[in-house]
Amino acid sequence: MMNKIRIALLFTLSIAFISGCSSFGSAMKASPSGIHAMGLATISQEDIEDEYTDEDSKWYAYKGLRVHYKDKGEGEPIILLHGIMSSLHTWDDWAKTLEKNYRVIRMDLPGFGLTGPLTEDMNYDKDEFITFINSFSHMLELEQFALAGNSLGGYMSAHYAAAYPERVSKLVLLDPVAYPQDVPWVIRMANMPGIWHISKKVVPPLMVSMNVEEVYGDKNRIKPEHMRRYVQLSMRKGNRESYAEVLKLIYEKSKPGQEDFPFNRIQAPTLLMWGEADKWVPTSQIPNWERDITNTQTIVYPGVGHVPMEETPKQTVKDLIKFLKDENPQPVKTEVKTASKEESQEQPATEVELAPAA
C-alpha cells in the first residue's frame, strides 16, 4: 500500500509541476477525501449511482454490462454519443430543449460513466462499438434515427453511419476524432512506457481537471458541477482502466496508415460542428471529413473548444434543430458557416425557447 501511495504522490506531483498547479483547487474540491485526491480510492457503485441517476435513468443488459441510459421525449428519435472520459450528462442542456419535440436517447457508453469497463469478451475497437450501437438501437425498436456524437462518440457515430447507412437519417459530428493527427500532450504522456500501466490504477483528479480545462475554449465557462462530475465518474471502479485503454486506442489510431476510412459510404446529410479553439482535435481536420462525406454542412464556433454542446449549448442546439428540420437538404453542397463571436461566447443555458419542430 505504501508503494502505491508513493507512486500516486509522485505521479500527482509530476502532473502538478507540468501544469503549474492551475487545476489543483478544482481537483481537490471534487475529491471526497485526500486518498481520492491522490487517485488511489474509488467511489462505490451504490454511491455513484445515487449521485448520478434520476427518475429517467434506465438500464440495458449487454454482454454482462448494465448500460445506463435515458430515453425521453416524443417525435423523431436522436441518439447522442458522448466522448472520452465523459458520460450522458454532457448532453443535459441539449436534452432539455430537444425533449420538447424529439425523442432523445443517450447513454453512458461501455467503458465510461455508470456503465463501467468492458467485460472480458469485449474489445476497445470500432467494431465492438458498432455492434453495441446496433444492438442498442434494435432493443429500442428503432428502424431509423438521427445520430450525433462528440469526439470519440463522433468516431463511433461516423463508423456506424458508414456500416448501416440505411438506419441513420441525419448525422451530426461534434469535433470528431478519426484521422491521423498530432495528439495532445496528455495522451502522449499517458502512453509513455511505465506511465500507461500506472494510469490503469492511479488517475489523480488533478489530471482529470486539467483535461476538462483543456477541452474548453474558455475554462471560465466550466460549471462547478461539471468539473465535479468528470472527476467523480473517473473514480467509478474500473473506469481508470477503461480510460487508459481508450487513450491507447486514440494514440495508435492517430498515427498515419492505421486504418482505411469508410466514411464515403455515409449517405445521411451530415452536420459538422467544431470549436475553433479545440486543442484536442483541431479545425485542420475539417477538410478530411468534407472530402469523404459528400453531403456536409460545417459550422465553426470561435472561442469554443472540444465540447461545444456543453460549452455553448444555446447556440449549438439551435443550429442542430435547424439542421434536423431541413427535410430536403441539397445533395452535394458543402456549406461552411462561422458562428458569430457573440453566439459562441454565450454562457451555458439550461432552457432555450424554440418554435415547435415541423
Image (cartoon, rainbow, N blue to C red):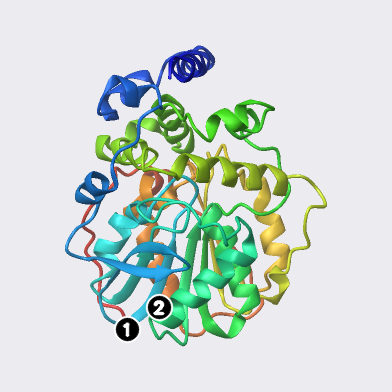
Question: Which residue appears at 37% of the width and 45% of the height?
Answer: 311
Front-most of 228 and 238?
238
Name the residue located 29 percent from the left edge and 47 percent from the top edge: 45
Instruction: Please give left or right for residue 152 compared with residue 5 in the image.
Output: right
Which quadrant does the N terminus fall into?
top left
Going by the image, does 74 lie left or right of 179?
Answer: left
First in sequence: mark 1 vs mark 2: 2
SS label for mark 1:
loop
Label ID, residue 339:
none
The answer to the question of whether label 1 and label 2 lie on touching residues, with beta carbons closer than 8 A, is yes
Query: Is residue 252 visible in the rendered structure shown here?
Result: yes
Residue 215 point in image, percent of width and height: 48, 38
Which percent across, then down, holds residue 143? 46, 87
Instruction: Name which residue lies at 26% across and 80% down.
Output: 74
Question: Above or below — where is 24 with respect to 314?
Answer: above
Q: How many marks?
A: 2
Specify whether 329 is left or right of 290.
Answer: left
Gap between marks 1 and 2 measured at Cα: 7 Å
Tag 1: amino acid = Ala
Q: What is the residue that sits farthest to the left in this orientation?
A: 55
Q: Is residue 212 above or below residue 283?
A: above
Task: Give residue 146's position: percent from left, percent from top.
Answer: 46, 75
Q: Is residue 268 above or below residue 262?
A: below
Which quadrant of the structure image shows residue 182?
Answer: top right
Residue 358's label in the rendered image is 1
Secondary structure beneath label 2: helix
Within 10 Å of the Cα at label 1, are there few (<14), some (14-19), or many (20+) other Cα atoms?
Answer: few
Q: Which residue is mark 2?
A: 325
Note whether residue 27 is visible: no
The 10 Å Cα crowd at callout 2, few under 14, some 14 to 19, many 20 or more, is: few
Using the rendered view, name the quadrant where residue 272 is placed: bottom right
